[in-house]
Amino acid sequence: MSKSGLIYYRDLIRELVLRDIRVRYKRSVLGFAWTLANPLLYLVVFYFVFKMALEINIPRFGVFAFTGIIVWNWFQSSLAQSGSAIVGNRELVRSPGFPPDILPLVTVTSNLVNLLVAIVVLTGYQLTLGSGIHSQILFLPLLVGLQFVLILSLAYVVAGINVVFRDLGHLVVVLLQLMFFMTPIFYDASMIPDKYQALYRLNPMVHFVEAYRSVLLGQSGINWWAIGTIGIISLVLLMFGRSLFIRHSHRFAEEI
Amino acid sequence: MTVPIRVVGLRKSFRRKHMLNPGTLKEAFVSRLRRFDSSEEFLALDQVDLEVRQGEIVGVIGRNGAGKSTLLRLIGGVGLPDDGQILVHGKIGALLELGAGFHPELTGRENIFVNGVISGLTRAEVAHRFGDIVAFSELEESIDNPLRTYSSGMQLRLAFSISVHTSPDILLIDEVLAVGDLAFQQKCLERIEHFRRKGCAILIVSHDIEQVKTVCDRVIWLRDGKIAAFGEPQGVVDQYERAMLLETERRRHADVPARRTRTGRELRIDENRKGTMEMEIVDVQLQDIRGLPIAELKKGKALVVVIAYTTRKTIRSPIFSLTISDENGETFLDTNTEQLDMPDIDQDTVANVHLERIDLPAGDYFVDVGAYAQNWGHVYDYHWHVYPLLVAADAKRDSSLHTPPRWELLPANAQDREPVIEDSNKV
């Protein structure tokens, strides 16, 4: 892509992400504070149900669950919204010179903003509590980058296929709801019986959630082998998914 | 010197959306089991060749569905042709989807940036031209209000203003020049002329035949996806209009009985009446402001024309027209419903046209009424010089403040129900 093309791409992403964020919070009472209110509300309910009622024994349950929630939310929201990334932007796709492959990218990026805000708050909380930050936090950008690749690769697949088969978006939402329970958000992965561990760990989000906990809360080490493998597979999936997406993108204008 | 736009042997067909086309995974799964072949091809463009040179304006005319928008989009790079070549040199600016990226919750200012970047400007360029864009659109007052508070006319003005502040080498315009009031349209045409003088190659789709004749250097007539004529505007337009007339004749119902008006005048086809009669004008009454029927009016007084339409089938968004002409055929007043959001008509309908002041010199006039298909495609019914109106002199000299005529549509058998559509000429 030429230099002017890159600037166009960059400005376009910026304007569309800004548009997404502004629109989401324009007329809400809480406004941008809703970014935090959402995970915090989940946390309150989880704390009551899992920590207190079901007595799941995890030290410092609050930050434990909060980390899981915000990492999962990025994954879940991006994929749930990617279904409509193309079909919901008809006039954009039909505008000459508009690159439709930018739309799933915008979706993932605007949801990333939510995660970053939450991480800042969480880290601030850790500091005030005195638990401090650990050197492992330096790995955070790498972790975010790898998760970005994972989510984006899936987003291209969902966004593209949903143009032709409109029920895929709904199917994805249901699958995500189920996958929520298969990810250690409000419980620890060690609570899964040994014979199911291998199967359980096929879920890439298991490894990401654990890695984030390690980086943000200093809990145990990062499983680099797992993360690295996921990273490579995601990269391959991204390249393949994106090129497939672009190859068929000329049909999008007609199909929506 | 390379030609900015060059199209050779362009062919494009669409798979018509069939009920049997799998639109969901479930349907695809089921149809695989039953081996349904559900494709139905529709040829939108067939062997189209054209060229647009630098500093040239080429117009594209034709009926709805003739392939004009498809042609423009393909040249703009949206979608791929099935056959043929599209060779484009230069940066493309398009007035195709006006306001792409607009969101009603964002302010005008925020929307300018979104749409400006989508239209190909960098953010820095949008910031630099921001003042000009706002000034051109005449929306300084409301620029920081949310877009949903804008009327549709204001939104279109904003979108148009952004588009004309890009710097394209090629401009593709799809029927969007009828935006805003006459003064704004004039500004837009001047901008287009400005682009032309800078060497921009302009391709414009329009239904305004008059505009196409005056503005364009060459005109293409597209009929059913094929080029029916390409060349000098006057020549192509003449051919097009001749064909339209023949079309009207061809569709006519031969068994329509000669009608008489309520005043006893006989309506005779080809003498004072023409049209396909798919929709008919069955009654025209001239009334004064109190609703009493008249045939004579004092200059400056209000006139209400009540027109009754009947239809044999559902008519999509017709255009109703009313003109006042004198005995020599010179037109003094011309109003129609083209700018209104007309519904589909499937029942007997009555239109009340309110003319606040008839400021005509004293004399004999006729009220001519017409019903046309969408976009003036063909004539359903037209009564010419059938309904007389005598304008009497008035000694008083008042200043004439011209209020635009007001159209009001009602279902025929419920005069006191809510009007189906009302126009107060707001923009």
Image (cartoon, coloured by chain):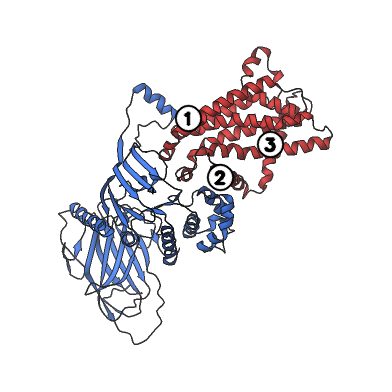
Chain colours: A red, B blue
B146 vs B301, left or right, is: right
Q: Are marks 1 and 2 in contact (CB under 8 Å)?
A: no
| Residue B184, disc | none
Q: Furthest residue to the right?
A: A130
Can you identify the residue that label 2 sits on?
Answer: A12
Q: How far across and how far down the image is residue B143, in percent?
A: 57, 59
Q: Secondary structure at mark 1?
A: helix
Q: Secondary structure at mark 2?
A: helix
A235 vs A94, left or right, is: right
Q: How far across and how far down the image is residue B308, in percent?
A: 28, 62
Q: How far across and how far down the image is residue B31, in percent?
A: 37, 25
Residue at position x 33%, y 49% from top?
A: B51
Q: From this viewpoint, is residue A170 visible?
A: no
Can you identify the residue that label 3 sits on?
Answer: A39
Which quadrant holds residue B9? top left
| Residue A244, disc | 1
The residues tagged by marks 1 and 3 sit, at their Cα atoms, a distance apart of 35 Å
Chain on which label 1 sits: A
Q: Nearer the viewer, mark 1 or mark 3?
A: 1
B14 vs B127, left or right, is: left
Whether A51 is drawn above or below B6: the answer is above
Chain on which label 3 sits: A
Chain on which label 2 sits: A
B410 vs A24, left or right, is: left
Query: How many numbered marks have been drawn onto this rendered protein structure?
Result: 3
Q: Furthest residue to the bottom?
A: B395
Whether B9 is drawn above or below B323: the answer is above
Of the two numbered discs 1 and 2 on the same chain, state the one appearing first in sequence: 2
Residue at position x 65%, y 22% from top?
A: A228
Q: Secondary structure at mark 3?
A: helix
The residues tagged by marks 1 and 2 sit, at their Cα atoms, a distance apart of 22 Å
